[in-house]
Amino acid sequence: MTEITDLQARITAALDRIAGGLDGLSTGAAHASADIAEIARLTEALDEERTANAQLEDRVRTIKQKQDSTVEDLAGEVDRLRIQLAAQEDTVAKLTRVNADLRANNVALRDAISHGVTEPHLVNKSMMAELDALRTAQEADRAELDAVLSELNALVADAARGAEQEEAADA
């Protein structure tokens, strides 16, 4: 009988341990389901952040491309304006030189006429200087017209580019 009481005590202790384990399992299962829900929520938040990050990276890439194209456009514009400026400076220098020659020749011609001497050489030289001055003035006018046309072409190109961008945005 002692054996039976011993066995009964052992079986009762085992059953208590099993019951305690089952309670722990049910409590652990509740914690596990809460952990799974938390993991799912955090995974969803992580996916949302990744999506937002990808969108921001796309925006940054788009802005950088736009900035790069703007810088290229501005560099091209600066180069074009430098070329125009150099052409105009050359024309102005030539015009200044030709006008100085014309003035010097006119002074010599006035001196010769005031002394009562008419020299065909000075008249020819004066006519040549005047023709040079007229040609140079014409070149200056042409350079100015080219600059105006260049600006107009740039404005038309900008307007066309803007219209294309608006059409692309509408599509």
Image (cartoon, rainbow, N blue to C red):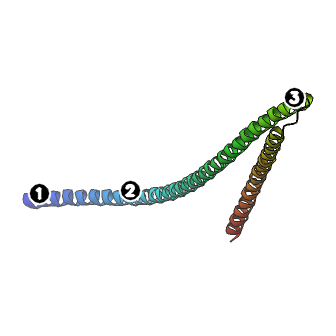
Disc nearer the start of the sequence (3/2): 2
Residue 23 appears at what percent x and percent y?
Answer: 32, 58
Residue under the image location 80 percent in, 40 percent down = 121
| Residue, disc 3 | 111
Residue under the image location 76 percent in, 37 percent down = 96
Residue under the image location 57 percent in, 56 percent down = 62
Residue 98 appears at what percent x and percent y?
Answer: 76, 39
In this rendered view, identify the residue nearer to me: 53 or 104: 104
In this rendered view, identify the residue nearer to me: 150 or 145: 145
For residue 155, side relative to residue 21 (left or right): right
| Residue, disc 1 | 6
> Alpha-carbon neighbours of circle 2 within 10 Å: few (<14), some, or many (≥20)?
few
Above or below, 52 against 132 in this view is below
**Amino acid identity at mark 2:** His
Q: CA distance from mark 3 to mark 2?
A: 117 Å
Callout 2: SS: helix
In this rendered view, identify the residue nearer to me: 89 or 68: 89
- To which quarter of the image does residue 42 belong? bottom left
Numbered disc total: 3
**Amino acid identity at mark 1:** Asp
Residue furthest out toward the bottom:
171
Q: Quadrant of the C terminus?
A: bottom right
Residue under the image location 75 percent in, 50 percent down = 143
Label pair 1/3, CB-CB below 8 angstroms? no
